[in-house]
Every structure is written in C-alpha cells, then in structure tokens.
Image (cartoon, rainbow, N blue to C red):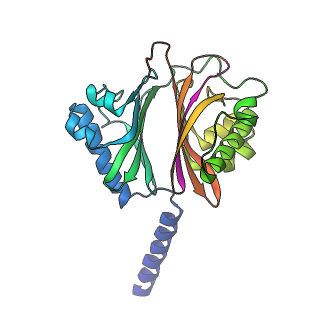
Amino acid sequence: MATRQLEMRCFKARIAVVFLAWMPVAAFGQGADMKQADSAFTQAVANSDKSELEKLLDADFTWTNSSGKIQTSAQVLGKVPQPAITNANDAETKVYTYGDLGDVQVNFGRAHVLRVWVKRPAGWRAIVYQELMSLEKPAAFTPGAGKDCENPCQTIAFTPQNETERQVALAYSKLETAAHARNSAAFGPMVADEFVAASSNSDKLQTKRSRMEDFDRSKDAGVAPTPLLSARMFVYGDAVLMVSEHQPDRGKPLHVTRVWVKRGGNWMETLSYQTSVAADAAR
C-alpha cells in the first residue's frame, strides 16, 4: 500500500511538472511581482493618487479610453481618468507574463480592459492601458481591408528597425493574410493557445478556437484585418509589444494593441485589443 501511494505521489508530481512546463504563463515569481504592481496601479487610479501612480508608469505609457482617446503619462498624471471598470471584484481577470513583458486582461460585461506591463531595472512599469466596449448585439457589418487586402496582407506601412521587428512584421502580414482568407488551418499556428481578440466592432471576445470556428463557417464576427497606417514595436527578448493605428475600408479608425511571443522559433500573437476611435476623441 505504501509503495502504491508513493508511486501515485510521484505520478502526480510528474504531471504537475509537465503541466507547468507546458504553461506559457509564469503564474508565480516575477508574475506575482507584476500582479502586485498591477494592484497598486488600480488602487492609485481609484484614489487618483498621482504620486503613487507616477511611480508605476513607464516613459512610453499611454492610456486609451473606450472612445479611442489616447493620453500620455503626463496627461494622465495631470488628471487621472475614470476607468471603464471601477470594481473588478466580480470581473474575469487573466494574467500572463512573457519574460520582461506581461499583461492583465479584465472583462466585465461589455467592458474589456487591457494593461500591459514591462520589467524595468526599477521594477514593473505600466506601458499600455487600453479599454473598449463590445457591441450589444452582433455587428451588422465588419470593417476590413477590402476585397484584395493589399494592406496589410501584401504590404504594410512599417519599416523594421531590427531583425526581430522584421520577423514580427512578416508574421503579422502572414496572420492577416490567413484571417482575410478565413483560413483556419493557416491561422491556427500563428496564434498562441491563450489568444484573445477584443474589438469595439464585435459583440464578443474571440478565442483561438472560436476564431477558427468562425473562419470555418465563413464568418468574421466583427473582427477582420484592416489597413495599417502606422505602428510601433517594443522588443523585450522573445516578446514584442505592437501598438498600431488602422483605417478600415468603412467605419471608424482603430487603435490596436498586440502582444507577440516567440515559441518554437516562430512568432505568435497572444492578443489583439481593438478600440474604435470616435470622431471627437482628441489626440
């Protein structure tokens, strides 16, 4: 009996090791440090505590509200904005870390909030806060890249500054080509298992599985490739933050945040948050 119990404990231990090795997310260690910084951030925002908030903002930090208005760290510290989700106790929260880059995703009803964090020598700093409101019902149409998808499927308005940016830019065009063709077989290997797409043009969050199922049904569900106007990439080892501006063939412009990670030698997209930019969203 004792031998059998020992064998079972060893078996469970091996299962745990395999599971943790497979996980793309660091749920502890520096992930815990990032979660602590994120909690301090949300508390500072709730209390409009500018002095505490300033300690947590990266030099490249931007705040994008649900109307698509983008504010710099200086503007945010001048007047702390009101967040879309003021109480996250009943919200769905997911936390991911990829080396020196990480993100926190909070979903509550139609409100979706993304906070991206970067590890600096002094600790974790917020580099992106972005929110959006999903539609109340399925989209009547999907803003896209037009019939031919010249941009971003064939060319994009982005000049890579290094080899990593070049590789991610190629992966981005390849991913959008697969999405435009609704080719789930080509799309699947380009996105991580934890992939999520949130858009002001859709009534639901899209996972890897739901996106592929929609493609197999020849549907877009409000999310489709859109022409790229400009982009910035921030490289942190095998993780890249991509922030971009888009002008669909119809509908409002989009402000988009993506996170890419390198796995098995290939760059994969882990998330895409797309916020429609209202006409009165001052820049």
- Please tell me which residue is depicted at 60% across the width and 52% down the height of the picture: 164
Task: Report the magenta stretch's main SS.
Answer: strand
Residue 194 point in image, percent of width and height:
54, 48
Q: Is residue 83 above or below residue 242?
A: above
Say which of 6 and 19 sits in front: 19
> In this view of the protein, can residue 106 be seen by the observer?
no
Quarter location, residue 62? top left
Where residue 254 sits, quadrant-wise, is top right
Image x and y of residue 261, in percent? 56, 52
Q: Is residue 204 toward the left or the right of residue 211 in the image? A: left
Q: Residue at x 62, y 23 (%)?
A: 247
- Where residue 271 sits, quadrant-wise, is top right
Q: Residue furthest right?
A: 148
Residue 6 in view here = yes
Instruction: Inspect the magenta stretch and tell me whether residue 228 lies in it.
Output: no
Question: x, y percentage for residue 75?
Answer: 33, 27
Seen from the viewer's position, the closer of residues 111 and 4 is: 111
Q: Which residues are magenta?
A: 238-249
Q: Quadrant of the N terminus?
A: bottom left
